[in-house]
Image (cartoon, rainbow, N blue to C red):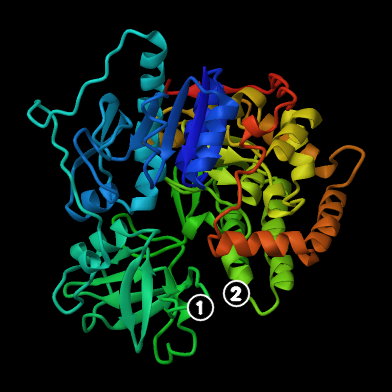
């Protein structure tokens, strides 16, 4: 079918739905919701069989939905209505939630129901739940609704609050007054619920000192104590504030803009408050912590049998200079341990998205900070590529993009959870990219496919990544099942009869990478990046990303209906590399 996706932004949900539908053989085009006339024009040009809105913050015009089937993806169970669905679910401690696909009509979120999928709430921050459990449920619900629509026999059910199992309700927008934290009276659980419900947008508006900030993110701390509201410590860019019965770590802040003043953006909390944290101690996190310990750690190392797990999780998946250097030091530590396999990646959510554009924008010299940042990631990629003492596995629990994904390709094997969305390109930020991708990507998928992936700038599903050889294994499971499967497979790899042969082959390959030394790839990439960092396109695109500028139009690589003579995308070649799906 011809399916037009209409979205307020090309976010992770829209990318997931786009990739899944394209995998299903549908002809998909995207139009950003930049105005009613723009949408009408897209309908006229593309003439879709079906319109789907994966993430839409405004109503579809009343002259479109009666004439064209329009399905809305709502991140709430049947009967749930309103723009703050997940916010209220997290703040109320809901144990079960869902995603509903319903038909657009005159009443917001009240149309006939085409599909719904429920899931168990994991007790996590909103952004992580949205990219993981909600995205999984949405993909299943959308594919089910599309199948039902294509079959022609299914009749969607009208919303009926009297029907058994309908537990959703209409809810108002969640305002800052609803999110306000009373530090003098609220325990850690209540504070975390509000922080989690506002992550990563809009944040919780609060006062620190004499200024207003949006607090972004939250982690429980079970050791530090103090006067409620007091900043007790700082670590890896985060601040720790006392609650009535404990404390919470807040990784990021965004200063509230002055009326009519310039915009602001999220940064590490200590970076925003620098100059006002005198006397607040730095409390480093140990690399290895006992099971059950609650605190904030960007980087953690643990072992089980012959496997070492180097887990990392950076806000938004952004990997700035300091964290990259700390991660390299942690990797060096893991290399010295008596383990046979090192697994890289956190237990859920982002693997990584490459250089930290927010920190770069905030730097006194953004071009020089870009240079430091890319070299810090390259140093880590080089260490992974050239290490010969263990086999390495990049385990992608969630989405990865640009330099974060290319970093994963430095590992001996790449595994990803089914549902992860991968974006192997840099071009939309005006960059050529580094992380040795000109060596690792063609080595995996071939030169032609590498060019298609990096130039096409479209999201890649886990299934498509497996098909092309971009990843070696897909683990079809929920986050808990994924972690268990990674542990099982890593132990199996460590005990495999051909382990010694694999390690010897890796050492041989590391000694020489063909006709061109490994360092030459990095030098050539960085020569182009040096020019990119000094150029106008990168600076302008970076600023638009950081300040969340509204695009003037839908990018042409997404709005295929606006390029009438667009050449068909060549079929992806099947990789010769061994590949498998686990848990399907």
- Marks 1/2 in contact by CB < 8 Å: the verdict is yes
Q: Crowding near pointer 2: few (<14 within 10 Å), some, many (20+)?
A: some
Q: Which residue is mark 1?
A: 271
Q: Give the residue at the far front of this rendering.
A: 63
> Which residue is more in the foreground, 541 or 459?
541
Left or right for 242, reference 24: left
In the displayed structure, would residue 335 be above or below residue 77? below
189 lies left or right of 562: left
Name the residue at 50% across, 79% down.
261
The residue mark sitting in front, 1 or 2, is 2
Q: Which residue is mark 2?
A: 362
Location of residue 33 in the rendering, given as x and y in whole percent from the top left corner: 49, 44
Residue at left offset 72%, top offset 60%: 538
Q: Residue at x 36, y 70 (%)?
A: 215
Disc 1 or 2, which lies upstream in sequence?
Answer: 1
The quadrant of the picture occupied by the C terminus is top left
């Amino acid at each position: 079918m011809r399916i037009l996706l209409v979205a307020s932004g090309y976010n992770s949900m829209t990318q997931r739905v786009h990739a899944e539908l394209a995998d299903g053989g549908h002809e998909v085009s995207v139009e950003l919701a930049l105005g009613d006339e723009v949408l009408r024009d897209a309908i006229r040009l593309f003439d879709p069989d079906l319109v789907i809105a994966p993430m839409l913050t405004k109503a579809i015009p009343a002259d479109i939905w009666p004439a064209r089937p329009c399905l809305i993806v709502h991140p709430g169970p049947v009967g749930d209505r309103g723009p703050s669905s997940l916010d209220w679910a997290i703040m109320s401690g809901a144990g079960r939630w869902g995603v509903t696909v319903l038909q657009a009509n005159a009443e917001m979120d009240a149309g006939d129901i085409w599909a719904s999928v429920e899931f168990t709430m994991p007790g996590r921050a909103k952004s992580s739940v949205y990219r993981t459990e909600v995205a999984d449920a949405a993909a299943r619900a959308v594919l089910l609704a599309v199948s039902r629509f294509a079959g022609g026999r299914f009749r969607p059910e009208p919303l009926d609050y009297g029907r058994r199992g309908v537990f959703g309700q209409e809810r108002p927008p969640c305002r800052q007054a609803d999110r306000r934290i009373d530090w003098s009276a609220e325990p850690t659980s209540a504070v975390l619920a509000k922080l989690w419900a506002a992550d990563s947008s809009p944040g919780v508006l609060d006062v620190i000192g004499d200024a207003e900030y949006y607090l972004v993110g939250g982690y429980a701390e079970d050791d530090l104590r103090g006067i409620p509201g007091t900043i007790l410590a700082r670590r890896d860019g985060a601040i720790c504030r006392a609650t009535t019965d404990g404390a919470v770590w807040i990784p990021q802040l965004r200063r509230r803009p002055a009326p009519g003043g310039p915009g602001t953006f999220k940064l590490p909390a200590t970076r925003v408050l620098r100059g006002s944290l005198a006397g607040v101690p730095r409390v480093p996190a140990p690399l290895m912590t006992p099971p059950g310990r609650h605190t904030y750690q960007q980087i953690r190392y643990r072992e089980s049998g012959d496997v070492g797990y180097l887990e990392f999780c950076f806000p938004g998946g952004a990997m700035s200079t300091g964290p990259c250097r700390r991660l390299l030091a942690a990797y060096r530590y893991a290399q010295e341990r008596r383990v046979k396999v090192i697994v890289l990646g956190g237990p859920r959510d982002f693997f990584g998205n490459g250089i930290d554009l927010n920190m770069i924008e905030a730097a006194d010299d953004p071009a020089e900070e870009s240079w430091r940042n890319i070299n810090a990631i390259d140093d880590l990629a080089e260490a992974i590529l050239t290490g010969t003492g263990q086999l390495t596995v990049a385990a992608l629990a969630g989405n990865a993009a640009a330099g974060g994904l290319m970093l994963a390709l430095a590992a001996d094997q790449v595994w990803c959870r089914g549902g992860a969305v991968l974006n192997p390109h840099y071009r939309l930020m005006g960059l050529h990219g580094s992380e040795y991708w000109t060596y690792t990507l063609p080595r995996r998928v071939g030169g032609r496919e590498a060019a298609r992936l990096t130039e096409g700038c479209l999201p890649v599903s886990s299934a498509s990544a497996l098909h092309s050889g971009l990843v070696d294994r897909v683990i079809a499971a929920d986050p808990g099942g994924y972690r268990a499967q990674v542990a099982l497979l890593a132990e199996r790899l460590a005990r495999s009869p051909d382990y010694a042969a694999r390690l010897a082959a890796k050492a041989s390959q590391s000694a020489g990478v063909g006709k061109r030394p490994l360092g030459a790839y990095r030098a050539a990439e960085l020569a182009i990046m040096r020019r990119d960092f000094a150029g106008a396109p990168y600076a302008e695109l970076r600023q638009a990303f950081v300040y969340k500028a509204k695009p003037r139009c839908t990018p042409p690589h997404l709005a295929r209906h606006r390029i009438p003579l667009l050449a068909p995308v060549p079929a992806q070649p099947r990789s010769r590399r061994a590949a498998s799906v686990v848990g399907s």
